[in-house]
Amino acid sequence: MFGLNTEHRLFGLDIGSSSVKLLEFSGATHNPRVTAYAWAALPEGAVVVDQVQDEGQVARAITQVVQASGTKMKHCAIGVGQGLTGITKVIQLPATLSDDQLEEQIKVDFERHIPHRINAVSWDFQRLGPTPGRESLVDVLLVACRREIVVRHEAAVNRAGLTCDVIDLTVFALHRAVNHLLLGEHPIDSFVIMDLGASVSRVHVFLNGMLQHVRDVDVAGHRLTDGLQESYNLSYEEAQNALRTGKLPHGYERSVIAPFEGELRLQLNRTLRSLRTADLELDQLQQIFLSGGCAILPNLAENLRADLGIPVQVANPFAKLPLGGRVAREELRHSGPMLLMAAGLALRGLKRD
Ligand SMILES: Nc1ncnc2c1ncn2[C@@H]1O[C@H](COP(=O)(O)OP(=O)(O)OP(=O)(O)O)[C@@H](O)[C@H]1O
Ligand SMILES: [Mg+2]
């Protein structure tokens, strides 16, 4: 499911809870070029925390982005939620087993590794390499996601006349985008990606190149939208639109943004500090990357850096990329952090170099 190689050229499709984003690259993974981009708002409740609730509305938004972007492709890569619903685990198995034998072995012991019945999840595995210090064993990454999440995402995409060639865990899409588009020739391997979306703010911690922790914080963009709606008597659509276009009511920064930013920052701090177990000290972390709509909040990155003592970067995947003629450059640069996930998915459509 997750790791299939595809024959087709494909674009990345990020189905978020406030909007659908389409991004298409051409070229090579170390130096891609944006060839298509579009964004479409979703009505409230169509997608809620990783899960498609209304396939028809999501399919309509997908059709809109396909038309608006001008892409000719019919195949895409989508992401499905990790957080509480997806699971990753590294297990050790005999190094002599073939891929088919690994699969059989994993099936036998599945519920010992992943706390779900095998029939209730979509799953895949990837050989990582020899287990350090144990030559006879190989490290295998096992990933799973509740089947109904995958099925509903795929159904919405199919209803829009597209095929999902790649279904990725969202955490891997973010990691790929950071690695290829932000770090490039200066790799680091212990960092945090905080994806600050509309229905959830998700903290992903990578240590020595491996995913170590995922934690969900329920203070997210929808709360900010709610605050704007209440304070200024706006509809959900008007509040979302005001945030996106920057056409905000007078005084909103003090009355709505500042209290929200304070609460979000407090929860992110708490979450990261709560992970200070035997395997994680904050000073092991080399960088924090912020993605999603709330990464754009003024002062958040700077304040988090001061709180935690770790460098914080707002993750703009387009900072160093050439942008093709058809795409709206200014909008892309401004919305960059909201497109990190779509960028990580779009990279799946390029040949590895
Ligand atoms: N300048 C901004 N422009 C757009 N959205 C913003 C801005 N500042 C804050 N936001 C908030 O960011 C959210 C949208 O972010 P994003 O597109 O990352 O969410 P999503 O991917 O749709 O949701 P999720 O990942 O939770 O499913 C909105 O809820 C909005 O309130
Ligand atoms: Mg999102």
Image (cartoon, rainbow, N blue to C red):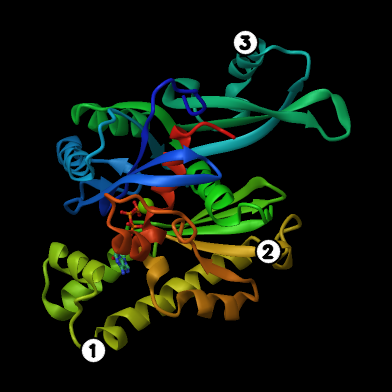
Measured from the top left, where is residue 77 in percent x and y? 39, 34
Q: For disc 3, does the CB lie below 8 Å from ligand 2?
A: no
Q: Which residue is mark 1?
A: 251
| Disc 3 crowd, CA 10 A, few/some/many (<14, 14-19, 20+) | few
- Judging depth in this view, the residue of 84 and 347 nearest the camera is 347
Measured from the top left, where is residue 37 in percent x and y? 29, 48
- Judging depth in this view, the residue of 151 and 157 nearest the camera is 157
Q: Which residue is mark 2?
A: 286
Q: Is 172 rendered above or below residue 351?
A: below
Tell me which residue sits at (12%, 72%) in the image. Answer: 234
Q: Earlier in the sequence, mark 3 or mark 1?
A: 3
Dot 3 amino acid type: Asp
Q: Are marks 2 and 3 in contact (CB under 8 Å)?
A: no
Left or right of residue 109: residue 45: left
Left or right of residue 309: residue 161: left
Marks 2 and 3: which is nearer the front? Answer: 2
Q: Is 16 rendered above or below residue 62?
A: below
Q: Earlier in the sequence, mark 2 or mark 1?
A: 1
Measured from the top left, where is residue 228 in percent x and y? 21, 75
Q: Which residue is mark 3?
A: 100
Q: Is 86 rendered above or below residue 221?
A: above
Query: How far is the residue under mark 2 from the one under mark 1?
Result: 36 Å
| Disc 1 crowd, CA 10 A, few/some/many (<14, 14-19, 20+) | few
| Disc 2 crowd, CA 10 A, few/some/many (<14, 14-19, 20+) | some
- Judging depth in this view, the residue of 34 and 10 nearest the camera is 34
Query: How far is the residue under mark 3 from the one under mark 1?
Result: 62 Å
Q: Secondary structure at mark 2?
A: loop
Q: Earlier in the sequence, mark 2 or mark 3?
A: 3
Q: Secondary structure at mark 1?
A: loop
